[in-house]
Amino acid sequence: EKGGFEHFMLKEIFEQPRSIADSMRGRVRAEEEHLQLGGLRDYLGQLAASERVVIVGCGTSWHAGLVAEYIFEELARIPVEVEYASEFRYRNPIIKERDVVIAISQSGETADTLAAIELAKSKGATIFGVCNVVGSSIARTAHAGAYTHAGPEIGVASTKAFTAQVTVLTLMALSAAQQKGTISNTVFRQLLAELERIPALVEKVLRDAQKVKEIAYIFTYARNFIYLGRGLNFPVALEGALKLKEISYIHAEGYPAAEMKHGPIALIDEDMPVVVIATKDSSYEKVVSNIQEIKARKGRVIAVVTEGDSHIREMVDFVIEIPNVHEMLMPLISVIPLQLLSYYIAVMRGRNVDQPRNLAKSVTVE
Ligand code: F6R
């Protein structure tokens, strides 16, 4: 059932070329410039006309929401707020009838997320669900939605569900942008074409898993880790840190790279590994300066870079190269080496990767 893999988590990491493709199947046909999410059809106008989108979720699903915030705001020009479901529901949130709430949940059963959308629904908001489990409570409570077609996720640490969520949310943002007219035909076409290439690019990253394993070996006994990224790679940094914490039990924190100088840089010394996502995008130069700040304090830097980047290679301790893709889609690629890094470190530490201590696959308690 693990398909020859040692753990479900590794199998699920390697399934991502397929689960991402499945989440686009029938929805995207780039050469015909076709994009349609069946489950949104009757509600697309409402999404495009909404004054505000509130995204709720927990854990990894909340991270997918943070990625979606950048994409929705950039492409569809709709203001987005991303909330932890557990915070949103307990503070008398301001919800108006023209608001759209998007609930993201792999299991579709997370108690806080379910309660958050019931609250928003009672105040008149329209609820969209982005769930992986068909017929789950959140999927049934939502007015409309789009399933992620990741297939069953058994490993407690979410991997393929995350990339499927980001894929579907990107399709939602693109649909809303097209409906609103906030995206040019050229960019729309380009993004659809790049989306279709994602499965092959993920495949390419997975072929370099051995390289990540070698780095994992070197850092197996680290006591702390810091993950940094900017823009769309900031939520990826949070996700990388969460993956490491939950399965290896190493303390890890994710930060927006520019926040370092406001406190966390005090933690940097020769014992602190820092994973920096430094792909060639609009914040590249800024991230390069952040790497210099860390190296000046003797931190050990593992940089995830765009292939062919020789500049960063000279500055850091280790590089992991990933293929280039449109900035809006980069999280789908840049998260892959971080999933692998946490997996290999946890295995080398002898952890129960698929069932880490204290965690459950679906959190139905509040
Ligand atoms: C992390 C993880 C959890 C879940 C969170 C939400 O790897 O699995 O953080 O993402 O419990 O679960 P869902 O998406 O089922 O609502």
Image (cartoon, rainbow, N blue to C red):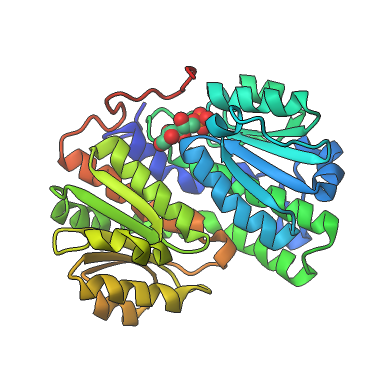
Tell me, yes or no, if residue 359 can be seen here.
yes
Residue at 64% in and 47% down: 81
| Percent of width and height locating residue 79 | 71, 53
Image quarter (top left, top right, bottom left or bottom right) of the N terminus: top left
Which of the pair 307/260 is nearer the observer?
A: 260
Which of the pair 322/142 is nearer the observer?
A: 142
Residue at 68% in and 58% down: 73
Residue at 57% in and 42% down: 165
| Percent of width and height locating residue 47 | 80, 45
In the rendered view, tell whether residue 366 sits above or below residue 75: above
**Is 194 placed left or right of 228 in the picture?**
right
Which of the pair 156/238 is nearer the observer?
A: 238
In the rendered view, tell whether residue 280 sits above or below residue 263: below
Q: Quadrant of residue 41?
A: top right
In the image as oriented, which residue stretches furthest toward the top? Answer: 365
In the rendered view, tell whether residue 138 sits above or below residue 97: above
Residue at 56% in and 52% down: 67
| Percent of width and height locating residue 335 | 42, 53
